[in-house]
Image: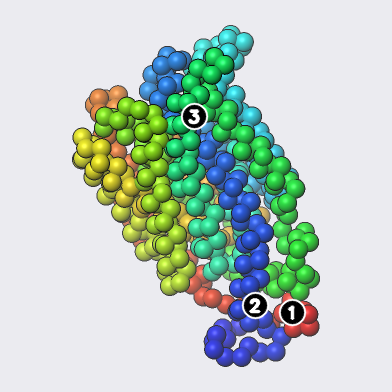
Amino acid sequence: MQRVPEHSHAPVGAPDLASEDRLYRKVILRTLPILLLCYIAAYLDRVNIGFAKLDMLGDLQFSNTVYALGASVFFWGYFIFEVPSNLLLHRFGARFWITRIMITWAVVSMAVAFTAPLAAFFHVEASTMFYVLRFLLGICEAGFFPGVILYLNYWFPTHRQSRVMSGFLIALPISLTLGGVLSGWLMTSMNGVHGLSGWQWMLLIEGLPSIVMAVVVFTFLCDGIDSAKWLSAAEKAVLKANLKQDDQGKASRLGEVFFNPRVWLLVLILLTFNTGFYGLAFWMPSIIKSTGVANTLHIGLLTAIPYGVALVAMLLNARHSNRTGERRLHAAIPAFIGGTGLILSAVFAHSPVLSVLFLTVAASGILSLMPIYWTLPGSVLSGVAAAAGIGMINAFGNLSGFTGSMITAMAESLTGDINNGTYVLALCLFVSGGLILAIPASMLGRSAERRPACQTEGDMAVSQA
């Protein structure tokens, strides 16, 4: 159906764009705040290990290599259970499955605080117990992020997703900004309370929000359009009509996922830019410490700066992409900016001011491309293929958590300088930018269109309402 110009009168029975926009704003307000808070809680539990490292290594007698392996083994558990978890979410519903994910990951994340006592209880080395807990954490959290991406695809057609994705993904800079300050403060102020170290209190306290949000999800989140009691029958019809129109031409069968070259291109893009992101997230506190900043709270405050600026950059880039309908350059240019920022942060590693400045540039570039990237799987996949495909893309892409954490550790081990690994992380971002530019135009064209729902029974229901 040909798009009706916004200044014209829509045909009888077709909902106008203003009405559709109001409907989608209603959906956003009922779903996005819950998902945003869940992801903030998730990332607190995922990356606080970078702050725990500052004191944990001394308490447990771990080397940087032990830490890097423990930080990265999380992603092996995540990788193995990602696709099954997403298929189970598609089968049992987002409400139940996301609740299960959040409760189990909170419990395991908090258990990391007791690595030494648990190791003594099971008669194993502390390092072995650390690896086991991190692996279990990956298993428990597997499926959360791709599950949310899949869930958003249950509601929003492709051309409406970039702004929604950015609204969800601002949880990344928010959690990393707040997490830096909160983690630094907890480790400083709670150290020694009731015989526990500051890093132990940090892991325990930062696990609580996930349990709270699990209760919120089970109480307030619905599985999809049909189960949303706050939508009228006419509103549900419009949403489903838009999705049906948007799904035309997409892969919808499970077998189409694994032999789709576009899916594997998306895997390579995610693998390369996530390597830069996780390398930055896991090692930024240590990089800042290497510039001469010793106080843990000060490190936390300085870590908050790059992510605070990145939050603004992410929103502005997503907003401009949504307004222009262009996505390739809005993802590739931030990748190149992120790589350049990482290189300059290493070049000026001797200066805390310049190092933090260029780490800010790097974080802004890396995070700005994320909401644009995550609109792409929905451009080629739908239904059960989307469930499996998004899970598979994120599963392989999250192996970058292993590469991102190990690259910096190996560079420090071989050269004695933690910043040398930063150059390799930057190279990964440049490769990612090149792969993004290689995305076929046919994969991006449809999402730029801003189309009203097609003339269906759903549209007639609106006109009669």
Q: What residue type is labelled 2?
A: Ser
Q: Which amino acid does label 3 sit on?
A: Leu
Q: Nearer the viewer, mark 3 or mark 2?
A: 3
Q: Mark 1 points at which residue?
A: 462
**Position of residue 362 in the picture relative to residue 442 (left or right):** left
Q: What residue is drawn where x is 51% and y is 72%?
A: 446
Q: Nearer the viewer, mark 2 or mark 1?
A: 2
Which of the two labelled residues, at mark 3 and mark 2, occupies the earlier sequence position? Answer: 2
Q: Where is residue 289 in the image (x, y as percent from the top left)?
A: 32, 30
Which of the two labelled residues, at mark 2 and mark 1, occupies the earlier sequence position? Answer: 2
Callout 2: few (<14), some (14-19), or many (20+) C-alpha neighbours within 10 Å?
A: few
Mark 1 falls on what kind of element?
helix
**Position of residue 371 in the picture relative to residue 233 (left or right):** left
Residue 100 visible from this viewpoint: yes
Check if mark 2's residue and mark 1's residue have beta carbons within 8 Å: yes
Q: Nearer the viewer, mark 1 or mark 3?
A: 3
Q: What residue is drawn where x is 70% and y is 73%?
A: 238
Residue 432 visible from this viewpoint: no
Q: What residue is drawn where x is 38% and y is 19%?
A: 63
Q: Mark 2 points at which residue?
A: 19
Q: State whether residue 458 is above or below residue 327.
A: below
Which of the two labelled residues, at mark 1 and mark 3, occupies the earlier sequence position? Answer: 3
Frontmost residue, 408 versus 196: 196
Mark 2 falls on what kind of element?
helix
Alpha-carbon span between mark 2 and mark 1: 10 Å
Q: What residue type is labelled 1?
A: Val
Frontmost residue, 19 versus 435: 19
Check if mark 1's residue and mark 3's residue have beta carbons within 8 Å: no
Q: Which mark is residue 186?
A: 3
Q: State whether residue 360 is above or below residue 31.
A: above
Mark 3 falls on what kind of element?
helix
